[in-house]
Amino acid sequence: MHKEALAELQACTPDERARRAAAWQGAGVILPFPDSVFLGKQITLAPGCVILGGCILTGNTSIAAGCVIGPNTVLHNVTVGEGTELNNVVGADSTVGNGCAIGPFVQIRPNCRIGDKVHLGNFVEVKNSTIDQSTKVSHLTYVGDSDVGRDCNFGCGTVTVNYTGKAKFRTTIGDHVFIGCNTNLIAPVTLGDFAYTAAGSTITEDIPANALGIARARQVNKDDWVLKKKPYKE
């Protein structure tokens, strides 16, 4: 948890926490489980938004109208646009646009800007990146130090490989890009608009617009290999 958020939690008494929840309920915020949420002193909640159980909202977090936050969502200094749903999300120092569907089990690390109608599905992590509107990152993917265009689709298991061990580099992805499952994008690399990657590829060179990038070895079958080598126990 962010150190500032932890300090805010420790400084708040149970009575004060209850008073804050009651005040927000009086202002039109929907809190079905008020005893199980923590609402920081500086946050902003629009009337009609829903904060479900297990949520911790701290810092300058702002939740717009029509949002459903939670359950079990932890936000610190995060701005969330109208009509967005965050389910089991951890986020800090970032902005999320309107009409997004994010979670469950998503981490939005600092310096991220998530555009309108973006979908981030289960077990997705985003760090120091921008993702433009209507892009879908559905599951099991890491997007770090990247600039992603609009209406892209990330296949399962995609990784932007941003760190060499000494330095970090950015990945640039254009609009309408389709990234096949289990693609590694070795930064710095750029994918043009409408580019595709074949599933299982490790991309180390730029892919021009409208091109398909394939970077994987051809399959070779060794007939009767198991019968000759018997690698497994009887």
Image: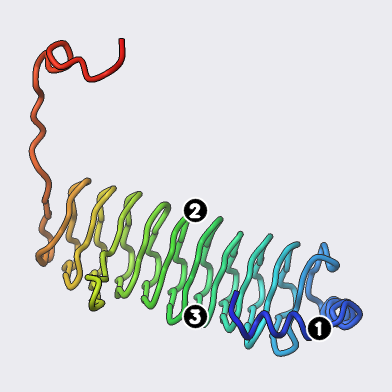
Give the image location of residue 143, x and y in percent.
35, 66
Q: Quadrant of the N terminus?
A: bottom right
Question: Badge 2 local density, few (<14 within 10 Å), some, or many (20+)?
Answer: many
Element assignment for label 1: loop
Quarter of the image where one finds residue 147: bottom left
Percent coordinates x, y for residue 202 in the rendering: 17, 54
Classed neighbour count for the residue bearing mark 1: other residues with Cα under 10 Å, few (<14), some (14–19), many (≥20) = some
**Three-letter code, disc 3:** Ser
Residue 129, numbered label: none
Q: Residue at x 82, y 80 (%)?
A: 24
User: In this figure, which colouring scheme has been used for the structure?
Assistant: rainbow
Q: CA distance from mark 3 to mark 2?
A: 19 Å
Which amino acid type corresponds to the residue marked 2 in the rendered image?
Answer: Asn
Residue at image coords 26%, 63% = 176
Residue named by callout 1 = 12
- Residue of label 2: 122
Q: Give the labeled residue for mark 3.
A: 94
Mark 1 and mark 3 lie on one chain; the one further toward the N terminus is 1
Asked whether disc 1 touches disc 3, contact meaning CB atoms under 8 Å apart, the reply is: no
Mark 2 touches mark 1? (CB < 8 Å): no
Residues under labels 2 and 1: Cα distance? 32 Å
